[in-house]
Amino acid sequence: MLLGVGSDIINIERIQRVLNKFGDRFCYRVLTETERQHAYGKRQVAGIFAKRWAAKEACSKALGTGLRMGIAWKSISVNNLSTGQPMMHVTGWALHRLKEMTPPGYQSKIYVSLTDDHPFAQATVVIEALPVI
C-alpha cells in the first residue's frame, strides 16, 4: 500500500553558495554526522549535500507535512549501504509521523532515489506499507 510520495530538486550551485557563506554552521544544522562524513574528502561535496537536502525535502513531503510540525532537518537522514544504495532513516517527530500514517498490521518502508546532473540535484521518496507477516 502506498502511503506517500515526495520529490524535490535543488540547484547545486545554491548549496555551494550556502557552504561558502556559512560553512560548517550550515552542515551541523542540516546534516547528521554520518551524512557529513560521507561527503568530506570527496570532490563534489556540494553535490552530495544537495542530494541530501533534496532527499530530506522529498521525505518530508512524502510524510505529508513538509519541514514543519516538529520535523527537524536532522530527524531525516540519508545513509548508504556498502553497495552505495541510499537509504532513508527517520527519527524524532518524523518517525512519529511515519508510525501515525502506517495502518495497524503494517510496517512502513521508505525508498529513496537520488540523482544529480550539474547544476541540479533531485530526490524522490516513496513510502510503502507492507503487511506484517
Image (cartoon, helix red, strand yellow):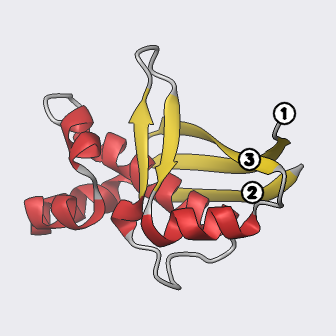
Q: CA distance from mark 3 to mark 2?
A: 16 Å
Tag 2 and tag 1, C-beta contact below 8 Å: no
Q: CA distance from mark 1 to mark 3?
A: 10 Å
Q: Is residue 90 above or below residue 47?
A: below
Q: Is residue 119 visible?
A: no
* 10 Å crowding of disc 3: few (<14), some (14-19), many (20+): some
Is disc 3 placed on a helix, strand or loop?
Answer: strand
Instruction: List the residue tagged with mark 3.
Output: 107
Instruction: List the residue tagged with mark 1.
Output: 133
Q: CA distance from mark 2 to mark 1?
A: 24 Å
Q: Position of residue 46 (x, y in %)?
A: 27, 46
Q: Is residue 20 above or below residue 129?
A: below
Tell me if 105 is positioned left or right of 28 in this view: right
Quadrant including the C terminus: top right
Is disc 1 placed on a helix, strand or loop?
Answer: loop
Q: Position of residue 111 (x, y in %)?
A: 65, 40
Instruction: List the residue tagged with mark 2.
Output: 5
Q: Which circle, 1 or 3, is nearer the viewer?
A: 1
Q: Position of residue 3 (x, y in %)?
A: 80, 58
| Res. 40 image quadrant | top left
Between discs 3 and 2, the one toward the N terminus: 2
Between discs 1 and 3, the one toward the N terminus: 3
**Residue sticking out furthest to the top:** 83
Is 62 in front, or is 109?
Answer: 109
